[in-house]
Image (tube, grey):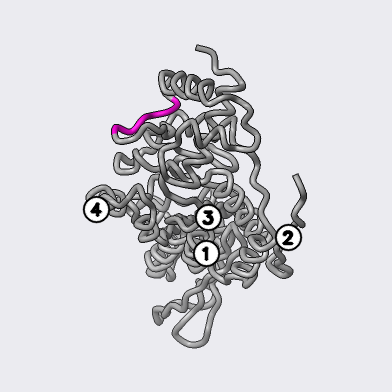
Amino acid sequence: MELTERKKKVLRSVVDLYIRTAEPVGSKAITELPDMKYSSATIRNEMADLTAMGYLEQPHTSAGRIPSAAGYRLYVDELMLDYRLTMDETHSINAAIEEKMERVDRMVEKVARLVSQATDLPAISMAARQGGATVKRFDLILAGEGSFILVLMLNSDEVVNKLIKLPLNVEEADLKVLSALLNATMTGTTEFSAELMDRLMRSAGAAAGLVPVIVEFTADTLRRQGSTNLAVAGQMRLLGQPEYRDVDKAQRVLTSLDEEALANLPAVMQNANGTQVLVGPENVARELKDTSVVMTKFDIGDGMQAMIGVVGPTRMDYAKVTARLSYFAESLSKMFAKPDQAQLPAPEPDKEA
C-alpha cells in the first residue's frame, strides 16, 4: 500500500495531536485542524490504512488512534516540521549555561540538570576523551633535600604533578638519567608492562627504586583521564507523564535510568554524528523498549567529546526536544572551544511563518 502525501499529512497530524494531548486521536479532531481540507470519512479511511500499515495503533478502550513505534520513526525521519526556539527559550538556555564550568565532571552533572529542566524529561550528559590520554613529556625536578616533583605533560597539554620522597642515595644526576629514560620509552603509550618496568629499572641505576612509583602514578593518571564521565538527572520527571501512571511500568523504567544502566548508551553514538533518535524497540536496554531516547554528540575541545540526551515517552515532542538539545550542544561546544572568551550565540528573533 502506497504511503501518499495525504497519508503522511494525516499521520503527522495524529502524532502532533497525540504529543500535545496524550489522548487517542479521532478523525473529528483532525478535520478541525485549520490546514486539513479532507472530509471526516476520508480521514477515517486514511487512518484505517495507516493502522493496517503499522504506523498507527488503536487502544482497546478508545475509537481514536495513537502512533506506533514505526509511526514515530517515520515522523522523526521525514514528517516533523522544524521547531524554531522562541526568544524566551533561547534567553532561558543562555542564562542557564552562560557561567563557564571549570571542570568537566562538574560540567557533566550541571548540564544534565539544565537539560532536564529545559525539556522536563530525564536527561543524560556524558564527556569522554577521544583516542585515550598519553604522556607527552616527563620531568623530574629536585625539590630540596629528600624529595622531587614528578611532572607529567599529557597529550591534551594538561599538566599534573606529584611530590615524591627520594631514597637517600639518589642525586640530581640520577633524576636526569631517569627522566631521559622515561621520555624515550613511556611517552605516547598506555601500555606499561612488567617487561617495560623491568627494563627501566635495570637502566635507571641508583634511581631504579623510583620506577614503580612513577609508573603507578602515570597509569593511574591516564586511567582517570581516559574515563567517561556520565551523569543522569531528572528521573522523577517521568512520573508527570501520563504513560507512567502505571506504578510497575514507571518502576521498571526508573530503575534503568542510572549511570550504570545507561553506560552503554554512549557506545550507540560512537560512529554517529549530530543528533540520533532511538524510538521504542530500537533501544538497547529492554526496560526502555516503550520509551524514546534522543542524543546529540559534540566536541568540547582538548580531545574531549560530549553527549547530551533525554529519555521519555515515545509521545515526546521530537522537534522541540531536538531543537533544544542542538542549541545546548552548539552553545557548549562554542563555549569550550574558546575558554578565554566563552560566549553563547545570540538568540535569533522570531520569524513569522
Residues under numbered marks 4 and 1 in contact, where contact means CB atoms less than 8 Å apart = no
Residues under numbered marks 3 and 1 in contact, where contact means CB atoms less than 8 Å apart = no
**Mark 4 secondary-structure assignment:** helix
Q: Residues within 10 Å of mark 4 (few under 14, many from 20)?
A: few
Residue ID for mark 1: 114
Q: Residues within 10 Å of mark 1 (few under 14, many from 20)?
A: some
Instruction: Judge left or right: residue 54 versus residue 350.
Output: left
Residue 272, visible in the rendered structure: yes
Q: Which numbered circle lies on residue 347?
A: 2
How far across and how far down the image is residue 322, in percent? 57, 47
- Disc 1 residue type? Leu
230 and 149: which is toward the camera: 230
**Would you identify the image quadrant in which residue 9 lies?**
top right
User: In this rendering, is residue 208 above or below 348?
Assistant: below
Q: What residue sits 51% from the left and 77% below the top? A: 149
The first of marks 3 and 1 along the sequence is 1
Q: CA distance from mark 3 to mark 1?
A: 32 Å
Q: Which numbered circle lies on residue 134?
A: 3
Q: CA distance from mark 4 to mark 3?
A: 48 Å
Give, as a single range, the part of the protein colored magenta.
55-60
Residue 57 on the magenta span: yes
169 and 294: which is toward the camera: 294
